[in-house]
């Protein structure tokens, strides 16, 4: 059994008990979040929403973390001008409790 859920413009394939990494949520660790389901399949029955189904995926916020540092460099030829910028993306880890 799996479902496709939507979270602020991103879609994730989830199953009960699975963990997913999403953009940081404004929710404390340990709290629950409901995500709308776009597609649901239990192996025999397939349910496609238009655009959403009546089901919700209940997820528990496990933790918040930061991603690996990404480095970007800017270089202007013949100008002796260089600039280096770093960025770390904020993530939240969700555990899917149930899809109902």
Image (cartoon, rainbow, N blue to C red):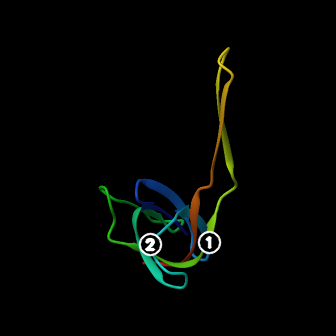
Residue visible at 40% across and 58% down? 8
Classify 10 Å Cα crowding around label 2: few (below 14), some (14-19), many (20 and above): few
The image shows residue 19 at horizontal and vertical percentages of: 62, 70
| 74 up-or-down from 38: above or below | above
Residue visible at 34% across and 59% down? 49
Residue visible at 47% across and 82% down? 32
> Which of 92 and 60 lies nearest the eye of the viewer?
92
> Which of 23 and 36 lies nearest the eye of the viewer?
23
Question: Is residue 90 left or right of 57 when viewed as pictured?
Answer: right
Instruction: Spot the residue most to the top.
Output: 78
Residue visible at 31% across and 56% down? 51
Q: Secondary structure beneath disc 2?
A: loop
Task: Count all numbered tags in the image, as a single digit.
Answer: 2
Which of marks 2 and 1 precedes in the sequence? 1
The image shows residue 29 at horizontal and vertical percentages of: 55, 81
> What is the CA distance from the residue labelled 1 to the residue labelled 2?
21 Å
Residue 26 is tagged as 2
Image quadrant containing the C terminus: bottom left
Q: Secondary structure beneath disc 1?
A: loop
Residue picked out by circle 1: 18
């Amino acid at each position: 059994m799996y479902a496709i859920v939507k979270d602020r413009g991103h879609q994730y394939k989830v199953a009960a008990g699975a963990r997913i990494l999403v953009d940081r949520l404004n929710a404390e660790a340990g709290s629950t979040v409901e995500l709308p389901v776009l597609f649901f399949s239990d192996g025999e029955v397939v349910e496609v929403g238009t655009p959403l189904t009546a089901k919700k995926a209940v997820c528990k916020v496990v933790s918040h973390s930061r991603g690996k540092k990404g480095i970007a460099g800017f270089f202007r030829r013949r100008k002796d001008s260089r600039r280096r910028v770093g960025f770390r993306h904020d993530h939240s880890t969700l555990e899917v409790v149930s899809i109902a």
